[in-house]
Amino acid sequence: MWKTLVVAAAVATAGTAFAQDKKALVAKVLQLQQPGIESTARIVAEQPAMQMLQQAAMAIRARVPEDKREALARDIQADAKKYADEAVPLLRDSAVKLAPTTIGPILEREFNEAELKQLITILESPVNRKFQSLGGEMQRSLTEKLVAESKPAIEPKLRALQQSVGDRINAAAAAPGAPAQPGR
């Protein structure tokens, strides 16, 4: 009876230690991958502003007098930079915070402790190829969660940027000497 209890306790302790060791290895992998996680956040933050800048450039060419285009484009780029300066750190911090709950479970599920150790040492191995193949899934997982959780904080900033860009274009287009708008 004692022997059975001692063996059961030893197995339970070993299992707990293994789980803690694996979690520590996953945490280390996430720490090593933090630049990539931050890069994903930067892309998520900057993509809407970049699209808006492209749309603004087309509107400026179509609706704003040529002598006012360059200055207006600079002002709009400054607005977009201000948006990015506010949004990127917000999303970066959120992405780093979300990584353990989005990427971490994928790593825990797909890699054993030995593989995680190999990954941490960044050896040229099949493990590295396996990790790289999961990059898309991990990025999608983080991006989906990041967009969902940050939407309330980012949408007002994006609307403000959109309003600012629209106001600037409309003001420039209403100025004397503005080209006639198509369809009017």
Image: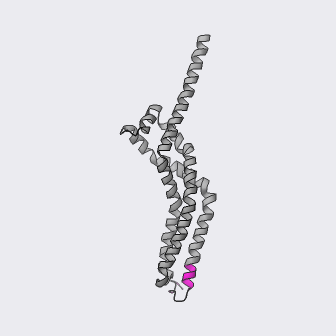
Q: Is residue 24 above or below residue 184?
A: above
Q: Is residue 181 inside the magenta stretch?
A: yes
Question: Percent x, y for residue 34?
Answer: 49, 47
Residue at 52% over, 39% down: 27
Residue at the bottom extreme of this rendering: 177
Q: Which region of the structure is painted magenta?
A: 169-184
Comparing 167 with 137, the one in front is 167
Q: How is the image coloured?
A: one colour
Residue at the left extreme of this rendering: 124
Question: Percent x, y for residue 175?
Answer: 55, 86
Q: Quadrant of the N terminus?
A: top right
Q: Mostly what secondary structure, the magenta segment?
A: loop
Comparing 84 with 103, the one in front is 84
Q: Is residue 42 left or right of residue 121?
A: right
Q: Is residue 182 inside the magenta stretch?
A: yes
Residue 148: quadrant of the picture:
bottom right
Q: Is residue 51 above or below residue 171?
A: above
Q: Is residue 87 above or below residue 13?
A: below
Q: Is residue 91 above or below residue 156?
A: above
Question: Percent x, y for residue 21?
Answer: 52, 31
